[in-house]
Amino acid sequence: MSRLPPRSRTSSEAIDAVLPQTQCTRCGYPCCRDYADAIATGDANINQCPPGGLAGIQKLSALTGLPVLPLNPANGEEGPRQLAWIDEARCIGCTLCIKACPVDAIVGGFKFMHTVLADQCTGCELCVAPCPVNCIDMITPIAPLAWTLEDAATAKARFIARQHRQQGLEQAQQTATDKSDQLKKVLERARQRARSRLSDRDSESVE
């Protein structure tokens, strides 16, 4: 694996800024920022991002000083931008695709029809596998859709907002669990005191 020259380390932020922010995980990392971190530390190569394609590899090469390499086939192939499409007649409203979408580009309620916000979809394909009824397809628009820096910035902002919301929900759930555990302990102590008082009264009655 080619590693960043020690004297020309590039920051994760700078690398992340040229990634497409599709959050597709095809690079082998959970998100674009993690891939950027791995490139910056020399733990990942610059040719692992299919959505970025050759143009993305060239940008990363210019930024890091690493040589241009062909896209690693193990990570996928470069292709036109695709969008997720839900067959609404077959959708059962399970919400699994909503939970899988890294940028909140799918809307709908439990047991209600879901739909994709086409202008927000990054084409990551992460919603396809979880669908239990195979009602999601990846389609290529008739008119090719370019993925711009503005699109990448919007996708990144939506991804970060989703992460923050999930962290807030997890913290709220943990707080609720902690309070429930505390309540259980209080109730158990109260029951123990009640049993102790009953035992004392029974002892007094026997005497």
Image (cartoon, rainbow, N blue to C red):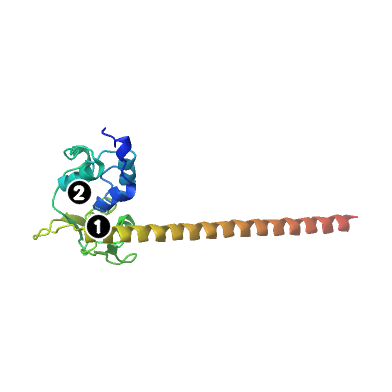
Q: Secondary structure at mark 1?
A: helix
70 on left or right of 196? left
Q: In percent of the image, x 12 and y 59: which residue is there?
A: 141
Q: 186 above or below 38?
A: below
* Relative image position of residue 138 (x, y in whole percent): 18, 54
Q: Residue at x 75, y 57 (%)?
A: 193
- Which three-letter amino acid code belongs to the residue tagged 2? Gly
Outermost residue, top side: 1
* Crowdedness near tag 2: few (<14), some (14–19) or many (≥20) residues, C-alpha within 10 Å: many
Name the outermost residue toward the front: 7
Q: Which residue is mark 1?
A: 152
Q: Report if residue 121 is visible in the image.
A: no
Residue 52 marker: 2
Q: Nearer the viewer, residue 90 or 154?
A: 154
Q: Would you say residue 77 is visible in this rendering?
A: yes
The residue nearer to you, when weighing 37 against 71, is: 37
The amino acid beneath tag 1 is: Ala
- Are circles 1 and 2 on residues that touch, CB within 8 Å? no
- Residue occupying image coordinates x 67% and y 59%: 186
Q: Position of residue 178 (x, y in %)?
A: 57, 57
| Horizontal side, residue 20 vs residue 175: left or right | left
